[in-house]
Amino acid sequence: MKKRIFSGAQPTGQLHIGNYLGALKNWVALQDEYEAFYCIVNLHAITLPQDPSTLRKATLDLARIYLAAGVDPEKSTIFIQSDVAEHAELTWILSCISRMGELERMTQFKDKGKGNTERAGVGLFTYPVLMASDILLYQTDLVPVGQDQKQHLELSRDLAERFNRDFGETFKVPEPYIPKAGASIKSLQDPEKKMSKSDENLNGSIFLLDDPDTVTKKIKRAVTDSGTTIEFDESRPAISNLLSIYQILTENTAEECVAHFEGKGYGHFKTELAEVVVEFLRPFQDRVREFDDETLLSILKPGAEKARSIAADTLRKVYERMGIVG
Ligand code: ATP
Ligand code: LTN
């Protein structure tokens, strides 16, 4: 029996190269070895205000991105979170065993709630419990995510262990899979911050659907540190970030990249990096255009059926163990 993986992304804003390098690229790489479930987490999206028609469109567009990135529906199950009602149901159950204190410690809540807990939505607060439900419903072994999700993963593990201890062995305790390179791609405008869909400064992110001109301009404008050499150096986060994007996309070792740019300046490096990114995005963007809505639905609907059968099994066990009987 293959081990199982589960992951998801939110249909909010445009996906950027950080989402690809930190998450999607690994989803594709892992789908041969594992039984994979990749979810479009639209219920997570509404933890911040969304325009309904934009959300509806973004949900299908994200399915297109998964497929264009190389998630293969013959190998992996792709589905929309809201099509499997068990995610919302288990969230209620797990909320009842979650503690205010542990959710208050979640840094994403602090960041996205902008420190104003009075005004922050309750959904934003309980967001990690919904994420734990996503994962635990499928008896997941491994969760490929970027570094920013590590804390949420730990909560999922804690909730699984707590439930198992209090009600008997029910959930598999999932492990995170965080890539060594690409786990946290930084903003091109501020290497202290991660590249983010919700960044107001659009020049900080290279979006997967950016045209070649825009990509080149953004890379040319990317901030650099003092110094002139092209090397990985913790004290020079801006160049290290650009170099890791180059490294992952060219699939070279760090040493090979540094040797390649020895004696070259920032201008030369940025030109080459822009070419590499543009050449990576070109075929990706062609593939995005290949999937019409009908094709997408013919993948997503059976995906949800398959997901639901597994999710329902787990939820039934949960109800039985807790004494909630129909
Ligand atoms: P953002 O902060 O960009 O708005 P998010 O984390 O809210 O993104 P998702 O679309 O749900 O949005 O994220 C999908 C995946 O991309 C997650 O596994 C997340 O860890 C990963 N990810 C997000 N930003 C980065 C980044 N800058 N570098 C590496 N991985 C990232
Ligand atoms: N919180 C994640 C998205 C997400 C997720 C999941 C990732 C929701 N449910 C389950 C892995 C497994 C984020 O990237 N913002």
Image (cartoon, grey):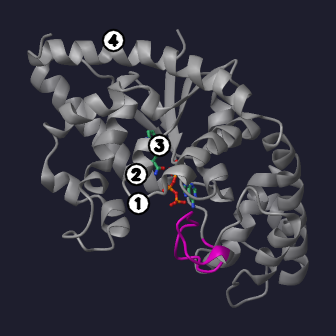
Q: Which residues are magenta?
A: 187-202
Judge by depth and name the residue closer to the eye, 287 or 185.
287
Does dot 4 land on a helix, a strand or a loop?
A: helix
Q: Amino acid type of disc 2?
A: Ile
Q: In the image, which disc is placed on residue 313?
A: 4
Asked if the residue under mark 3 is in contact with the one under mark 2, i.e. CB atoms within 8 Å, the reply is: yes
Residue 42, disc: 3
Counting residues from the start of the chain, the first of labels 3 and 1 encountered is 3
Q: Is residue 19 above or below residue 96?
A: below
Q: Tell me the amino acid under the disc marked 1.
A: Pro
Q: Secondary structure at mark 1?
A: loop
Horizontal side of residue 281 vs 78, given as left or right: right
Q: Give the residue at mark 2.
A: 46
Q: In this image, 258 relative to 321: left or right? A: right
Which residue does the image show at 47% across and 43% down from the upper left?
42
| Label 2: few (<14), some (14–19) or many (≥20) C-alpha neighbours in 10 Å | some
- The disc, 4 or 3, on the residue closer to the chain's N-terminal end is 3
Query: Which type of secondary structure does the marked residue at label 3 adopt?
Result: helix
- Between circles 3 and 1, the one closer to the viewer is 1
Q: Residues within 10 Å of mark 1 (few under 14, many from 20)?
A: few
* Residue ID for mark 1: 49
CA–CA distance in space, label 2 to label 3: 7 Å
Neighbor class of circle 3 (other Cα within 10 Å; few <14, some 14-19, many 20+) is many
> Amino acid under label 3?
Asn
Q: From the Cβ of disc 4, is ligand 2 less than 8 Å away?
A: no
Are the residues flagged by discs 2 and 1 in contact, CB closer than 8 Å? yes
Q: Helix, strand, or loop for circle 2?
A: loop
Q: Are marks 4 and 3 in contact (CB under 8 Å)?
A: no
Check contact, mark 3 vs mark 1: CB within 8 A: no
Which amino acid is tagged 4? Asp
